[in-house]
Image (cartoon, rainbow, N blue to C red):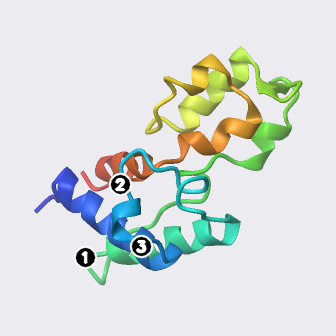
Amino acid sequence: MALSRDEIYQKVKSVLVDALSVDDEDVKPNSTIRGDLGAESLDVLDIVFRLEKAFTTDPTRKFIIPRGDLVPDEKLMENPDYVQAGKLTPMGLAELKKKMPYSDFTTFDQNPGVDKLDSLFTVDTLVKYLESKLK
């Protein structure tokens, strides 16, 4: 039986509370994983591992989050066709949207600075990603 969006959200919330030692009420759909919840690079890896474990319901078929699925590859940000003067080019923005279809780009589109990338990685991004993968 498929999980509801709320069930997925509750599991994600539980993982984030445990992994980041944050209060339950701090985890909201629009909370950013790094900025609001304080995750660092190693924390993101731990969160991915914990999510895989939390969403593996059949021991014979492990739920796996492939590398680069949630967070874009660093090579994207090093490509001069995609990033110039600290901002994503239209081509770079299009590529990022392909790689992060679960993120809300509404605000980011206004000022697509590399320094604002973390704003795309929210609790809701995780929930939408997992919701699509668990169907």
Residue pictured at 17% horizontal, 59% vertical: 3
- On the image, the x and y values in percent for residue 16 come to 44, 69
- Please rate how many residues cluster around mark 2, counting C-alpha atoms within 10 Å: few if below 14, some from 14 to 19, many from 20: many
Instruction: Tell me how far mark 3 sits from mark 2, CA to CA.
Output: 17 Å
Quarter assignment of residue 82: top right
- Dot 2 or dot 1: first in sequence order is 1
- Dot 3 or dot 1: first in sequence order is 3
**Residue at the bottom extreme of this rendering:** 59
Tag 2: amino acid:
Leu
Label 1, secondary structure: give it. Answer: loop
* Residue identifier under label 3: 17
Instruction: Tell me how far mark 3 sits from mark 1, CA to CA.
Output: 21 Å
Q: Which of label 2 and label 1 is nearer to you? A: 2
* Residue identifier under label 2: 130
Height in image: 46 above or below 116? below
* Residue identifier under label 1: 57
Residue pictured at 43% horizontal, 39% vertical: 102
**Residue at the left extreme of this rendering:** 1
Q: Which of label 3 and label 1 is nearer to you? A: 3
Q: Is residue 105 visible?
A: yes
Instruction: Tell me how far mark 2 sits from mark 1, CA to CA.
Output: 14 Å
- Dot 3 or dot 2: first in sequence order is 3
